[in-house]
Amino acid sequence: MIKVLFVCHGNICRSPMAEFIMKEKVKKMSIENKFYIDSRATSNEEIGNNIYPQALKTLYNHGIMEATHYAEQITIDDYNYFDYIFVMDQANIRMLKYVLYGCNLSKVSLIGDFIEENIPKRWKNGYKDLSGRLNTSLRSYLQGLFLIMLLVFITQSIGLTLAGLE
């Protein structure tokens, strides 16, 4: 199972939107049983709050109706559990250095790196722009992940190993 965590400042807009968009993408591909997807916050400001109403409306407008969520802050246990942790911007990385003190953050990547853009805070360009950027980033991530999985499958099925390439 591939465990993916999305992280933003408050866990009420960007990261839950990414979580539910990703869940919808893998569901449409009939591979939802291969993934565990969740989201967290770097701060504790919104803990227990639901998705921001405008973010929820945007998800509904894209056909994502099952979006029950309550904000949680990331923990060191989360860091150890998840395979991939995607943050929305550089400020999230700076905060993780404090929240996850002692972790090397090697599992952490900017989700916007897949499209060479930051994922803006909700009030910068609106939710439609935000969901579009998240969709594009997640599509690129899944395409790259599937290429890697395909290469692993092919090399295993033909018995190729790194030792055999020496």
Image (spheres, rainbow, N blue to C red):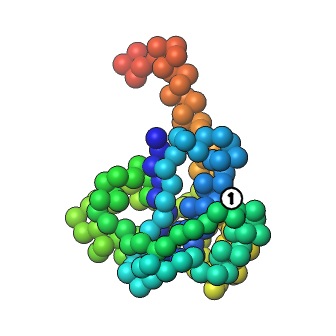
* Relative horizontal placement of residue 90, taking residue 51 as reference (left or right): left
Relative image position of residue 80 (x, y in whole percent)? 31, 54
* Relative horizontal placement of residue 22, taking residue 158 as reference (left or right): right
Residue 160, placed above or below residue 142: above
The structure residue drawn at horizontal position 42% and vertical position 72%, both measured from the top left corner, is 72
SS class, disc 1:
helix
User: Foreground: 131 or 159?
Assistant: 131
Q: Which residue is mark 1?
A: 136
User: Foreground: 6 or 60?
Assistant: 60
* Relative horizontal placement of residue 114, taking residue 41 as reference (left or right): right
Q: Quadrant of residue 129?
A: bottom right
Let me know if residue 153 appears in the view: yes
Q: Quadrant of residue 105?
A: bottom left
The structure residue drawn at horizontal position 35% and vertical position 52%, both measured from the top left corner, is 81
User: Foreground: 165 or 76?
Assistant: 76
Relative image position of residue 23 (x, y in whole percent)? 60, 54
The structure residue drawn at horizontal position 66% and vertical position 74%, both measured from the top left corner, is 56
Q: Quadrant of residue 75?
A: bottom left
Total number of numbered discs in the rendering: 1
The quadrant the C terminus occupies is top left
Let me know if residue 118 appears in the view: no
The structure residue drawn at horizontal position 41% and vertical position 85%, both measured from the top left corner, is 45
Residue 158, placed above or below residue 6: above
Tell me if mark 1 has few (under 14), some (14-19) or many (20+) residues whose alpha carbon lies within 10 angstroms of its own.
Answer: some
Q: Amino acid at mark 1?
A: Thr
* Relative horizontal placement of residue 88, taking residue 53 as reference (left or right): left
